[in-house]
Amino acid sequence: MTKICCVCQRVEYKTYWKDDYTFAPDERVTHGYCPICFDVVMSDLMDYIEDNDLQGGKDGGKTDSGQQNSLCV
Ligand SMILES: [Zn+2]
């Protein structure tokens, strides 16, 4: 199965990624990320997580004691 990068459209060919790959008529294709676009996507994702405070830090969690008290009554 041939992997094509869904961002830059390059195609994984043996050990590198080709810009000008020609598909065979019956070639089966799967989409993914080339290493370069994967790094970009991951750093964007990390920025998004930090910007939106999705790491469950300060405000999340730590409400167990209150809930346990009400359950025990
Ligand atoms: Zn790419």
Image: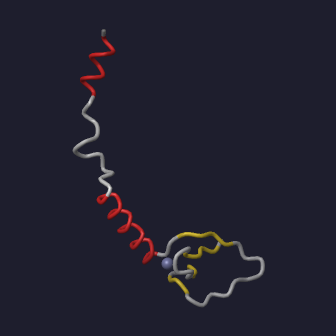
Q: How is the image coloured?
A: secondary structure
Residue found at the far bottom of this picture: 20
Residue furthest to the left in view is: 58
Residue depicted at x 70% and y 83%:
23
**Viewer-closest of 3 and 53:** 53
Res 1 → quadrant: bottom right
The image shows a total of numbered marks equal to 0
Residue 5 found in image quarter: bottom right
Q: Residue at x 39, y 72 (%)?
A: 39
- Closer to us: 1 or 50: 50
Q: Position of residue 24 (x, y in %)?
A: 73, 83
Residue closest to the eye, 67 or 25: 67
Q: Would residue 23 appear left or right of 45 to someone viewing this image?
A: right
Residue 36, quarter of picture: bottom left
Q: Is residue 10 left or right of residue 52?
A: right
- Residue 19 point in image, percent of width and height: 56, 88
Residue 47 picture location, percent across and down: 32, 64
When the figure is inspected, residue 66 is found, relative to residue 36, above or below; the finding is: above
